[in-house]
Image (cartoon, rainbow, N blue to C red):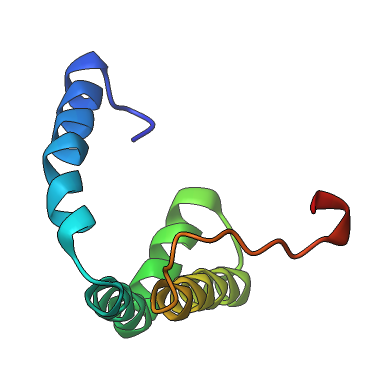
Amino acid sequence: MANAGTTETERAIDAAVKAFPVWRAKTAKERSEVLCRWYQLILDNESWLARLMTAEQGKPMKEAEGEVEYAASLIQWFAEQAKRANGEINCTRSDLI
């Protein structure tokens, strides 16, 4: 969205506002399934995404592939966490409790 102007930004915000009630109505399992599909799409398009990153940023291909895999792993992690959506916040650092 680096080249997005006011109009594109407003459209993106409007789309997010319209999509939220649908997302909110999904069960934890359904949300997890959506994220799992996104994870699989990233893996299915790993080469293309890595080439795109290399073309845009001049990044070595191996580094770009690693970033795509890392991004996919984050989506996978959130897909697993979505199954446990219960309204509680689980702290990972004891100093935040």
> In the visual, does 64 lie left or right of 15?
right
Task: Using the image, determine if residue 6 lies above or below residue 40.
Answer: above
Q: Looking at the rendering, which quadrant does residue 36 occupy? A: bottom left
| Nearest to the observer: residue 85 or residue 68 | 85
Where, quadrant-wise, is the C terminus in this rendering?
A: bottom right
Point 38% across, 68% down: residue: 49
| Rendered image quadrant of residue 91 | bottom right
Give the farthest residue toward the right.
95
On the picture, is 83 further left or further right than 26? Answer: right
* Outermost residue, top side: 6
Residue occupying the point 36% across, 78% down: 39
Name the one closer to the observer, 30 or 69. 30
**Image coords of residue 25 (percent x, y):** 16, 59
The quadrant holding residue 5 is top left
The foreground one among 37 and 6 is 37
Residue depicted at x 49% and y 61%: 54
Q: Is residue 12 left or right of residue 50?
A: left
